[in-house]
Amino acid sequence: PADVAASALLKIYEQCNGRNWERKDNWASENVPLCTWEGITCSDSGEIIEISLRTNGLTGEFPTKEVFDGIPTLTALSLEGNDDLMFSFSGVDKVTKLESLDVSKTKFNSFDGVNLYFTQLTEVYAAGCGLTGPFPSALLDISRLERLDLSFNHLTGELPSDIGIFFSRMELL
């Protein structure tokens, strides 16, 4: 499993311009524990549970499928502030353990697929992404969602009729 996780992390580094990141301590270093790589948090048992690469100069397309296939223990992902980073839920084909996602101020542009494999989410931050169109109704299917930030986007149209049930369980909107 450590080799699979290392491959997933290296895919982020290679695909998202890791050589030019602002903070990249231990990334792509051989014989260095993954838990010591910049922005990686592990559980007491050594499993990767969080990736936090906020405002770090990531560019390109985040390898979502490879990350969630290679790091099934991931519960938190923060990519906020990487203005030239694309993120999507496409390609993921099994339920993840992700509880917290922050893609604010990235090139994230669609919640398509979020309700299929990201059902454990309790927090979603997607502020300032340039989202357009109607409220992403796929979010209504995520029963554990308690915190949602879609501020500074360009959502238009009417809210779904069953949104009252959604709002009743929210702590932060």
Image (cartoon, rainbow, N blue to C red):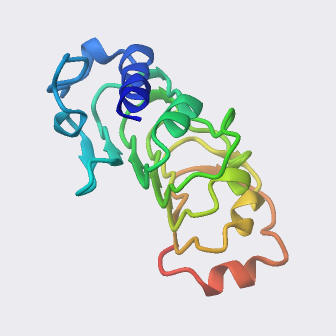
The residue located at (78%, 69%) in the rendering is: 159
Residue 110 image position (x, y, % from top left): 67, 42
The residue located at (49%, 52%) in the rendering is: 127
Horizontal arrangement in the rendering, residue 118 relative to residue 77 (left or right): right
Horizontal arrangement in the rendering, residue 71 relative to residue 92 (left or right): left
Horizontal arrangement in the rendering, residue 145 relative to residue 103 (left or right): right
Horizontal arrangement in the rendering, residue 117 relative to residue 130 (left or right): right
Residue 5 image position (x, y, % from top left): 40, 32
Residue 40's image quarter?
A: top left
Residue 15's image quarter?
A: top left
Q: How many marks can you see?
A: 0
In the image, is residue 1 above or below residue 74? above
Q: Which of 140 and 93 is in front in this view?
A: 93
In the image, is residue 160 above or below residue 21? below
Q: Which of 103 and 121 is in front in this view?
A: 121
| Residue 79 visible in the shown view | yes
Seen from this angle, which residue lies furthest right? 161
In the image, is residue 19 above or below residue 26? above
| Residue 135 visible in the shown view | no
- The quarter of the rendered structure image containing the N terminus is top left
Residue 38 image position (x, y, % from top left): 20, 35
The residue located at (44%, 50%) in the rendering is: 73
Residue 71 image position (x, y, % from top left): 45, 40
The residue located at (52%, 27%) in the rendering is: 63
In the image, is residue 28 above or below residue 3? above
Q: Which of 64 and 153 is in front in this view?
A: 64
Seen from this angle, which residue lies furthest bottom? 168
